[in-house]
Image (cartoon, rainbow, N blue to C red):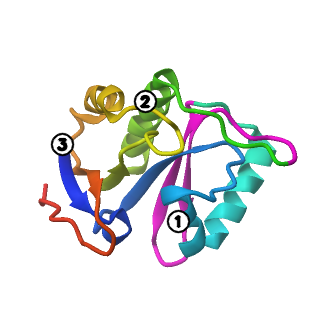
Amino acid sequence: MLHPVSGDILLTRAQVIAHGVAANDPMNQGLALALHERYPAMHKDFHHWCNQHHPQPGSAWLWGGADGVRIVNLITQEGGYGHGGKPGKATTKHVRETLRALAKMIAEEGFKSLALPRLATGVGGLQWSDVWPIVEERLGNLSLPIYVYTEYHPDVQAKEPVG
């Protein structure tokens, strides 16, 4: 069940936070930067995973922290492999594929709740009006609460409905 909310996704009560990145992303902008700063081990582990698996756009990778936090890195953009490689732009095709991978992960891992930003609209460069229908298509029929952070308000906890 999708619940559009306003607030700071870092203050979510959801079990899992998902966000869009590129393979080998430097995570130096937007939500990725905030997650990198809060969970430096996630960033290090993500790069190790990317170097081991060379993921393609459309992939998803789950990281679990020692304090129970769980972050899903959704590969919505072309990767920045090589020295100084910058992430490419996202595509609706990659968003569709990565949300398919996320839906499968939700079922396999038994997530109870998920927080999702306006996926691929920051560094990814897509328009929310193009992404929202894909989110609805891929995740709208799932039974867990999915809090979609449609407006960012720093340091404000969103009113996340239960169920």
Residue with the mark numbered 1: 35
Tell me if mark 2 has few (under 14), some (14-19) or many (20+) residues whose alpha carbon lies within 10 angstroms of its own: many
Q: Residue at x 33, y 35 (%)?
A: 128
Q: CA distance from mark 3 to mark 1?
A: 25 Å
Is 63 magenta? The answer is yes
Q: Earlier in the sequence, mark 2 or mark 3?
A: 3
Question: In the rendered structure, which segment of residues is drawn in magenta?
Answer: 58-83
Instruction: Report the front residue among 24 and 15.
Output: 24
Image height of 15 relative to 122, above or below:
below
Q: Secondary structure at mark 2?
A: helix
Rounded to the nearest whole Å, what is the CA distance between mark 1 and mark 2?
23 Å
Kind of residue sitting beneath label 3: Met
Q: Which mark is residue 1?
A: 3
Q: Quadrant of the C terminus?
A: bottom left
Which residue is the site of mark 2? Answer: 100
Which comes sooner in the sequence, label 3 or label 1?
3
